[in-house]
Image (cartoon, grey):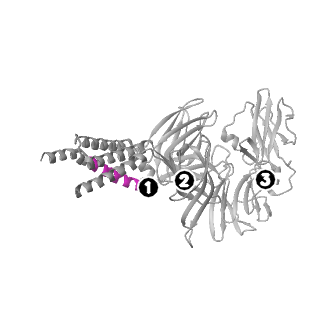
Amino acid sequence: MTRFVRILGSLRIAVPLLVTIGGVLAWGTIYETRFGTPAAQRFVYQSWWFQGVLGFLAINLAIAALRRWPWQRRHAPFLLAHLGLILILVGGVLGGRFGVEGQLIIPEGETSNTLELPAKLLLVHQPNPGRHQAIPVAFESRAWQRAPRFTVPLALEKGPVALTVDRYYPDAVTTERIEGGGTDDWPAVQVGVTHDGHEALEWLLARDPERFGLRWGPVHLLFLEARDAAHLAQLAGRASSAPPRGVVTVHLESHGTPVRFPVPSQFDRALPVPGTPYQVTFKRYFPDFVIDESGPSTRSDQPNNPAVALTLSGPEGTDAYLLFALHPEISTMHGWRHTIPAHLTYAHPAAEGLPPSSIVVIRTPEGRLAAALTGDAGQRQFLAALEPGAPYTHPWSETTFRIAAHEPRAQIHQEVANRSDRVRAEAVHLVLRDGEHATETWLGFGSSADLRVGAERVIVSYEKARRPLPFSVKLLDFRKVEYPGTQMAEAFEADVELIDPALGLTRRKTISMNNPLKHRGFSLFQASFIDGPVETTVLAARSDPGVPFVYTGFLIVVLGVILLFQRRQR
């Protein structure tokens, strides 16, 4: 009777604790179906309170074993079972608190050592002078959705700025509306295209590097601006007398007339800007600009990415410039600053080339609309004037188009709504405020926004957290075996090369479904792949310091069960 009471006393805490853990696991399963595995791991399985429950259960098991003191030989199965369970729980707590789990995404032929983690961040970057701030966020939690607001102070160069997140939509859908009446010159055109019975209306923004063109059916749709009459003639396909290396145009604020400098074949010679105390010195020309291990270089002699390096000198000092003909927005994106008040542009004949099978709407220097149509073999037809609503035909693809709307000062309005509680298309609403000025935007997961408030400029992105690995992995070859007659993958594997500079180690390994690569406590498994022109492997990487405890605990529990059966047989 006394033994029975003692057993009931030990179960008085253990049974409710086990019921609690079972309830939490059931709730975690439901939570995972609604919000995904990463959210369930962060808010349930790896949370401090769940790790505390597991730790409390381990302490309870230890106390239950100590109550049998002094131990006797017949207690061995009981003690081994308790010791094994304690080790399993300790391993689970260690893995949850100190384990690392993420993905290594490597295109074929490339090397990576950056691990994508399930956790998410708001990254705030001030391009100049180069301030960075990472803000951990967990918007998927139900608690945050009930009170969706927090403010983070940002220490920027010219003073403090407050970043506020006041709305979060896990399944956002965006409706865009473009209309005129804006304060800035921001040309936009809406083109209606029809081919083979299909029709669509598409907005194109001439000054947006991501929305000035798109592929629709058999043709490319582009909207470009002609800088001057010579540029318009080049787009129209007329003979061009532009210098083969291009032209740099220097516009000084103190000198009203822009000055054009053809890129010379000889460098490090100071060229005076007529009528001013300023000089231009060309340093280097890059036909196909690339940055390699030695720094800026050219990949080939073909003008695939022409760039030019030069300096502008004057009474204020000397400014260094790196200008790109095909990507003039790079200097603005990086916030490069100069002491001399001037604006420099670089034009190259390669920038005037038009893709085959294209419909290029052109805004002339006078503000009218023209069009250049190209065929597969380089044919070109120029339409000097486009009338709104009038139909035009692309002669080489039987595609018709019309100008549905033209807004020289367009403004974009976005309306964002939420469809459900499932985490499928996340978006957050940001407000950046410095007291007098404020700006706001919606930011989707995996994207960034360039925000300005007063004199400050910051880039905010919403993305996964990352951490470097102590080694690098290069994908040599990826292979996918499909089920006969389908495009479904039956098996896939990757040949990789592991490089560990600290150990001076290089080794090759084939990673497949049940054949991981293990190194420095990390196990890399073949998890998935991304199809495309360049095949990409997705490796699941995990480092769990609790695994030895868990395996040892299971072996001890099995040993205890074996001893228990042997004792009963005797």
- The residue tagged with tag 3: helix, strand or loop? helix
Q: Are marks 3 and 2 in contact (CB under 8 Å)?
A: no
* Magenta region, main secondary structure: helix
Q: Amino acid at mark 3?
A: Glu
Looking at marks 3 and 1 on the same chain, the residue that comes earlier in the sequence is marked by 3
Q: Residues within 10 Å of mark 3 (few under 14, many from 20)?
A: some
Whole-number angstrom distance, CA of label 3 to CA of label 2: 42 Å
Q: Amino acid at mark 1?
A: Ser
- For disc 2, the marked residue is 539
Q: Which residues are magenta?
A: 17-33
For the point 24% across and 48% down, the residue is: 15
Q: Are marks 1 and 2 in contact (CB under 8 Å)?
A: no
Q: Amino acid at mark 2?
A: Leu
Q: Is residue 112 above or below residue 163?
A: below
For this rendering, which residue is in front, 185 or 317? 317
Q: Determine whether, in the image, residue 502 is placed left or right of residue 236.
A: left
- For disc 1, the marked residue is 420
Q: Residues within 10 Å of mark 2 (few under 14, many from 20)?
A: many
- The residue tagged with tag 2: helix, strand or loop? strand
Q: Is residue 82 above or below residue 512?
A: above
Please name which of the two marks, 1 or 2, marks the residue nearer to the observer.
2
- For disc 3, the marked residue is 352
